[in-house]
Image (tube, rainbow, N blue to C red):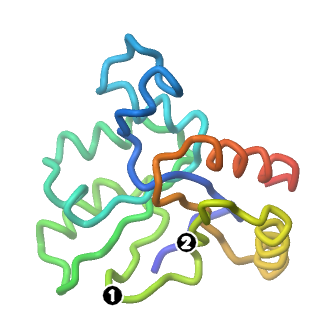
Amino acid sequence: MMQIPNSLCAVGAHGWDHADWVGAFYPDDMPAAWRLGYYSHTFTCCYLDYADWAQQDEATLAQWVEDTLPRFRLVLQAPAVALSAQDTARLAILAPRLGLLVDATQPSAQILWLADEPDWRQLAAQLQARAAQGLTSYVLSRESRLSPLQQAVTLLDVLGY
């Protein structure tokens, strides 16, 4: 597993291209190709399943790196089997934004999945405890609900991350 250098906490969603975010988060007239760059200005990470990143061509992956801010990190699900040479090549392209490669069969201690109704005090305590130990945390949402994600961003601001 890889960790984000010089960062204690990142927040994001499972994917960035959610139809219900158009008009609510993304401007109505924003081209789909611009969404990742826009997303990376608000959120600091994104979780992608293996199928979502492994099927992309090298040019698309390079564009993802180009479109995102240097602080932005990708949390990627590893394949259930050993990495192929093509996977390794894709990861090399994504290396400037790679935060964590997660074993598909085991939960990661670094990922804190947001509950439907998060206990913000408990989450804050977890983040502070992990940060005090120098551990990186990824606060991620499996759902495409914007409100908890935006509240998590605010929490990180309040905590100084």
Compare marks 2 and 1 and give the one earlier in the sequence. 2
Q: Secondary structure under badge 2?
A: loop
Residue 136: quadrant of the picture:
bottom right
Q: Is residue 74 left or right of residue 78?
A: right
Residue sitting nearer the eye, 138 or 113: 113
Residue sitting nearer the eye, 27 or 44: 27
- Could you tell me the amino acid type at mark 1? Thr
- Could you tell me the amino acid type at mark 2? Gln
Question: Is 153 drawn above or below residue 114 in the view shown?
Answer: above
Question: Is 28 drawn above or below residue 77 in the view shown?
Answer: above
For the N terminus, give its image quadrant: bottom left
Q: Residues within 10 Å of mark 1 (few under 14, many from 20)?
A: few
Q: Is residue 25 left or right of residue 104?
A: right
Can you give x and y, in whole percent of width and height, for residue 15 in the image? Answer: 38, 50
User: Which residue is tagged 2?
Assistant: 3
Number of numbered markers = 2
Residue shown at 78% from the left, 75% from the top: 126
User: Which residue is tagged 1?
Assistant: 105
Question: Is 99 drawn above or below residue 22 in the view shown?
Answer: below
Can you give x and y, in whole percent of width and height, for residue 67 in the image? Answer: 40, 33
